Image (cartoon, helix red, strand yellow):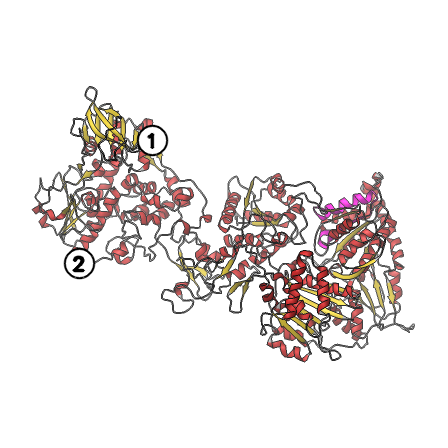
Amino acid sequence: MDMKTTDHRVLLGNEAISRGLVEAGCQFMTAYPGTPSSEILPAVIEFKKELGLNLYAEWSTNEKVALETALAAAYAGKRTAVAMKQVGLNVAADPALSAAYIGVVGGLVLIVADDPGLHSSQTEQDSRLFALFSKIPALDPSSPQEAKDMVAQAFALSERHQLPVMLRPTVRVCHSEQSIECKPVDAPFREADFEKNPRRWAATPRARMALHQQLNQKLAAIEKEFETWPGNHAFFPTGSTTQRAPLGIVAAGVSYAYLNDMLHSLGLADQLPVLKIATVYPLPRALVENFASRCERLIVFEETDAAVELQIRLSIPVWGRLTGHIPSHGELTPGVIEKLLVAATREAGLVPTERAANRMQDAVAGLELPIRRPTFCPGCGHRSVFYSLRRAFPEAIFPGDIGCYTLGLNQGSVDTVHDMGASISMASGFYHAYAQDGKTPPIFATIGDGTFFHSGAAGLENAIYNGARFVLLVLDNGTTGMTGMQPTPEFGKTADGHAGGIVNLETLIRGCGISYLEHADPHDLATFQRVLLDALDHTRAEDGGVAVVLARYACVTQMKGLGPNRTAVPVEVHHGTRPRAPDAVSALDAPWMPRHQDRLSPCAEACPAGNDVERLMTLAAADNWTEAARTLYAEHPFPSTLGRVCPHPCESKCNRNAYDGALSINAIERMAGDRGHSAATFATRGQTLGKTVAVVGGGPSGLAAAYHLARIGYGVEIYEALPEIGGMLRWAITEYRLPADVLERELEVFESLGITLHTGIRLGKDMAWSELDRFDAVYLATGAWKQRQLKIAGEDRAGVLSGLDYLYQVRAGQAPELGAHVAIVGGGNTAIDAARTARRKGAAVDVYYDVLLAIPEEVTAARDEGIVLHHAVVPVRFAAGETSRLKLYLRDLAVPQAGAGRDAPVFSTETSEADSVLICIGGDADLTYLSESDLAVNGRLAVDAWGRTGQPRIFAGGDASSAGAGTVVGAINAGKRAALAIHERLGGKAFDAAALQLGAGPGIATSIASSAAGSMMANSSPRARQQQSAPDATAIKLQFFRKKPRAESRHRAPNDSIWNFDEVNFGLGSAEATAEAGERCFHCGVCTHCDICVNVCPTEAITQVDGAYRIDQSKCTACRICAAECPRSAITMPQTGVCIACGYCTTWFECPSLKKGADGLVDIDRRTCIDCGMCIQVCAQGAIRPRQAQQMEVRT
Amino acid sequence: MKCQTIIAGVGGQGVLFAAKVFTEMAKRKKLRILGSQTFGMAQRGGSVMTHLKIGEFDSPLICEGDADLLLGLDCMEAHRTLPYLHTRRNGTGAVCVVNAPDAQAFPDRRVAELLDEMGVVVHSCNADAVALRMKTPMVANLVLLGFGSSREHFPFTYEEVCEATAALSGPSQRAVNLAALEYGRAL
């Protein structure tokens, strides 16, 4: 457009004001965005660009800063404007009041947009009353055109009286469109010229008094000027005489425009006197008095409050807000004015033409259309933040703030919204208020980046200074979204697009004194919750304080899509029938409802001894070692022993493994055995059943069988070939691993149970097989003591010894002298035991093995003690070496032998020498006692899983059997199984093998599985668990668990340990064990009454009654959030995989793209969905899935 | 000419662009225009309503019972704004053009009789479905405008709508926008 011509454009009121500003020669403008004022500054910049004006325009960081900046420019003589919304003026109140006293040189127009009806504001405050209060003249436009015209008038007025002038449009002026006359822009440019005058610009209180006096004089002069102001005009009906009109109308602002149209439609046009007021403060009182002199009464229409009415002093009645004739809240819409006008004119004796009642109003009211409340845009990161907050911390206090994210109200995670920046100060207040009572509820404050820049820092400084503790989430979408994407200081792009300085948000936050600042992506629900939990921990840590989480994501509206770093995940909602409904008859019957049902823990499933590991952890955490021991004694009498020698498969299966290391279960079992009472205290002999069982072999398998049989009530006699019972525990496992006194203590129980011990009696040598005939049943557990042969040349040389024999001899005090250098052959636990024993006897030790099978901790300890391990190196021949030593010919199995297969007799040239060689490659069973050979197959006693042989009276187990024990815990498992099988045979009572079995694990348990089996044992109180599948690590909600390193047992230093047979492993300290169990056990699959299900249930269907959870079926919507959020998978509820109209996503996630149909079923609104994919994580029923994905497996 | 139009919809449906088309048409006919729009919270998926008054008016808001035309981009919002429509004046009823998935969706049977009594002329079509078929769901507003302007009693002609839309569209959007109008006309 040509700058010199006039044209008409359809402009918004705000744009009209902007046009007025540039036409009036405004050279300097500041603003802070806020509805309904936000479009003024951008439009000024548009005109600046269009017309190539030299005009400075900035988005200031807040309204106070905006006004102060503008004031300086006006001091320097520039024509200056400031724009803000009404509540922004509260922020700028301090400079505004002084500005009236001190005044300006260049004109300053303070544009404040009011919001009657609260379309997008916190208060219905009337800025014209602020003008009265601050003594700043105020103009009140009734239309966009008038608002534009007023700008030039305001500048002139401002400069005439050297005083700021307020232009106060309301929302209907700001956001109305009108054809606007656009005049040429040719105002002269003024150069900055600040004239120093400290008595004015830096006035002290004394000088201010004089300024106040001057201000009052200026206002009096301005009032005089307003009497003849062109925008104020009085209308009198034609032909009106000196007789007073029954009613006169005073109107200001947009109410005047409504009134004009309304008078027409009521047939009252040109019937009533109307006074239009454009200059609200100071009110031209003479003009009003003159108008009133021709009326019997007045009614005043104005918004938002009674600024005009308050200034009127008349003897005739003045109807308005102060008299109750006009409502004192809400917008004065044409509809409201119509009603008021009808009532007032009637009361004044006039007859308005009333319109017929609007019947459609009632008809539409009858439709009960739901209010469509504003929500976050589809794909908005804020929604993910607030949804996650609510889901993770339903009980927290959520101070919120002003911005788009106020809508977090919809997700239930905004509790307070006050004014900009209040989230932070209020979080401090909540903290201190509760801390005073010794309470620390979780507090999560949320604030946007723009609002933080506006007024967050002061609150944060205060929180740090005064020691508040809460989590502050700064939601950084890099823009001021609510008001229309104005830039923030973070990216250095200014209002008109040129480069500015960059204020780094993170540096600013740290600068407030924050040491804990984490970044988080809210689109990954579990990870985000984890970050929040860590932050919450910081607020509760000894050296903690305020924790800040900075969540960064782009505004989807600004990006017109997902923006960078986010992948589109098109989703679909699956509908249809459920995949399978076990025993289902109706749509929502029990199988589809949540049940609190414990599951088997993976540790227990893995335990061959059938320990109830999860319960052990609960009792250990409670420091109740007596009950902990009792729990273990239900399954076996050896916790102190197993706590030392068990290869602990439980730890390998611990779900904590991949997270931060398995729980120290083995050490806790040891603690239970050592600290609790011995088994003798708890174990009682069952009521005698009058039948007897012989147990041949007093090793762990035989002892385990004897223990259970005696407790059931059988007379048990143990035949042991060696001088003492204990088997491998006593004779093969070394004392530095299992001290003699520990073993003795655990063996006490066999005497207290009244078991007859026959020691030094070897079956087939010291007693005949036929002597067993007097027993009702026989359990053969004779072990595998016969050293296996390598079957290589030179194995018969002197100095080549059996490792098992050697270990026995050491324990028996008959150890042979092995010499200075010992070679061990074998990679099992016996090999490592032999190696470390030889080391303690002073030898240098080399271990040769094919495969390493020993417990890893033992191997490490051996290495630490200076034992050299040769991986995959095996001897192929022993020969004579130097002097009396042995020469070992070795083969490295890792190196392929030239020209030959692995088993070909090609000798390596590699050799080594040793004084002795201990062969530790496992033992064979010595079954020479057998009279009937059909019991043995391949040198072992053939048995089934329950120790049954081919003969009904004979049972067998442990290393002597074909099942093989391998480990102490395996032997214990075999003994227990055999005891139950024997009881079944002798008691004639069948047992339910499946009920005893621990899931897919090797062990059985009488104390865990179903009651039918448990009742076989006296003194056992089984935990009935119907779910025998153990939850794996994916079923555990890791976000609920803080990482904590595994508690490791302390060990004697290798340098000290190799000089004697003192115990090497000290285990855990009692407090350590308690803490390990208490703070680290997930309690996989077992309800711990953590109340998370109660808290997350959106319909409050779950309550705790008498220590158990009860689900109110009438409230439960089957949304499955409880099952999804149970940290440990203790709630059973199958996923339907199809939408069941539970309403959870539409209520709590509330994405506008999730449309609920009349039947309650949800579908995606493809018009608005931007494929953010978040709703997939929201639907716990698995009905919302990535599009085109195949039918997923339904998880139970 | 005096025409009071309500455009009702939900944030993001293009209510503002539809309003711009009307403004442009009025401008081209050198008619005075006064309108009022909703900003702020309402843009976040809430109800959005634009009042447009073409001709000699002072008030930017339309009174209930005064509107000549209702353009409903959303069924529920159209129902909500029905009280704005006027009863038959000088033999002419108000016009109601609504984007509705099917004939049952609009008008609701509980208001249908009253609309009929008031002489309101109702035109409804599934503009969303058409826009989705075009793979540009955002142009449902123009489909509806094309549809409405080629029906009886609409205050502007289809050609006027096309000209205004073309003038307001950027070069990359023009073809799609005009196609949307044409699809609407052909309904």
Which element type, helix, strand or loop, lies under badge 1? Answer: loop
Q: Is residue A508 visible?
A: yes
* In-front residue for pair B137/A829: B137
Q: Is residue A331 visible?
A: no
Percent x, y for residue B38? 69, 61
- Graded by Cα atoms within 10 Å as few (under 14), some (14 to 19) or many (20 or more), the crowding at tag 1 reads some
Position of the N terminus of chain B by quadrant: bottom right
- Relative height, residue A844 to residue B11 (above, below): above
Percent x, y for residue A396? 53, 52
* Residue on which the image places disc 1: A1052
Percent x, y for residue A420? 66, 50
Which region of the structure is painted magenta?
Answer: A59-88
- Relative height, residue A12 to residue A654 (above, below): below
Subunit of label 2: A
Residue A84 painted magenta: yes
Q: CA distance from mark 2 to mark 1?
A: 52 Å
Position of the C terminus of chain B by quadrant: bottom right
Subunit of label 1: A
- Relative height, residue A637 to residue A1091 (above, below): above
| Kind of residue indicated by mark 2 | Gly
**At 42% from the left edge and 64% from the top edge, which residue is drawn?**
A578
* In-front residue for pair A211/A384: A384
Percent x, y for residue A669? 32, 43
Kindly indicate whether the residues beneath marks 2 and 1 are on one polypeptide chain.
yes
| Kind of residue indicated by mark 1 | Arg
Residue A257 painted magenta: no
In the picture provided, is A885 more to the left or to the right than A1023? Answer: left
Q: Earlier in the sequence, mark 2 or mark 1?
A: 2
* Residue on which the image places disc 2: A988
Residue closest to the far top: A883
